[in-house]
C-alpha cells in the first residue's frame, strides 16, 4: 500500500495531472481507513481478574507474567463472569485475550505446614 502511494506521489510531483491527484487522495483515504481499522481491532477487551493474584490482559502480551500465591486454601475456581471479555478467576490464574509471546509462570501453594 505504501509503495503504491509512494510511486503515485512521485508521479504526481513530476507531472501533476488531475486524475493522478485524485488517485493520490484516494490512496491516502484508504490508508487512513485501514490504519483506523487496525488500531480498533487491537484495542483490547474488558478484563475481569477476581482471583487471588490472578492476572488478566485484554490484548496481546509480550512480557513475562509470574504469579506466586502462598497461603491460599485449595478451592474450586469461581465460574467465569457473565460479561464478555477476558477472565482469570482462580488463585494465580492468568488469561490473555490476544497473542502471548511472554513466558507465563504460576505457583499456588496451600497454607504452609507448620
Image (cartoon, helix red, strand yellow):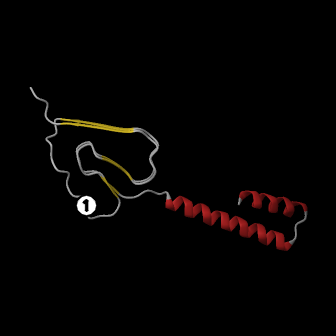
Q: Residue at x 76, y 61 (%)?
A: 4
Q: How many marks?
A: 1
Compared to 63, does 28 lie above or below? below
Q: Position of residue 103 (x, y in %)?
A: 41, 39
Along the horizontal axis of the image, is 113 left or right of 65?
A: left
Compared to 105, does 28 lie above or below? below
Q: Look at the image and tell me in which quarter the N terminus lies.
A: bottom right
Along the horizontal axis of the image, is 4 left or right of 59?
A: right
Q: Which residue is mark 1?
A: 81
Toward the left, the furthest residue is 114
Q: Position of residue 19 (x, y in %)?
A: 83, 73
Compared to 23, does 95 lie above or below? above
* Quadrant in the picture for residue 34: bottom right
Compared to 31, does 100 lie above or below? above
| In the foreground, 92 or 15 | 92
Q: Position of residue 9 (x, y in %)?
A: 81, 60
Q: Residue at x 72, y 57 (%)?
A: 2
Disc 1 packing (10 Å; few <14; some 14–19; many ≥20): some
Along the horizontal axis of the image, is 93 left or right of 77?
A: right
Q: Residue at x 87, y 70 (%)?
A: 17
Toward the top, the furthest residue is 114
Amino acid at each position: 500500500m505504501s509503495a503504491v502511494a509512494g510511486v503515485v506521489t512521485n508521479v504526481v510531483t513530476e507531472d501533476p495531472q488531475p486524475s493522478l491527484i485524485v488517485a493520490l487522495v484516494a490512496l491516502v483515504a484508504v490508508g487512513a481507513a485501514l490504519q483506523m481499522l487496525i488500531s480498533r481491532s487491537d484495542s483490547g477487551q474488558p478484563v475481569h481478574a477476581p482471583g487471588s493474584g490472578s492476572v488478566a490482559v485484554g490484548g496481546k502480551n509480550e512480557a513475562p507474567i509470574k504469579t506466586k500465591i502462598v497461603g491460599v486454601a485449595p478451592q474450586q475456581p469461581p465460574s467465569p463472569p457473565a460479561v464478555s471479555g477476558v477472565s482469570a478467576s482462580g488463585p494465580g490464574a492468568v488469561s490473555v485475550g490476544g497473542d502471548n509471546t511472554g513466558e507465563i509462570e504460576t505457583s499456588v501453594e496451600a497454607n504452609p505446614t507448620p
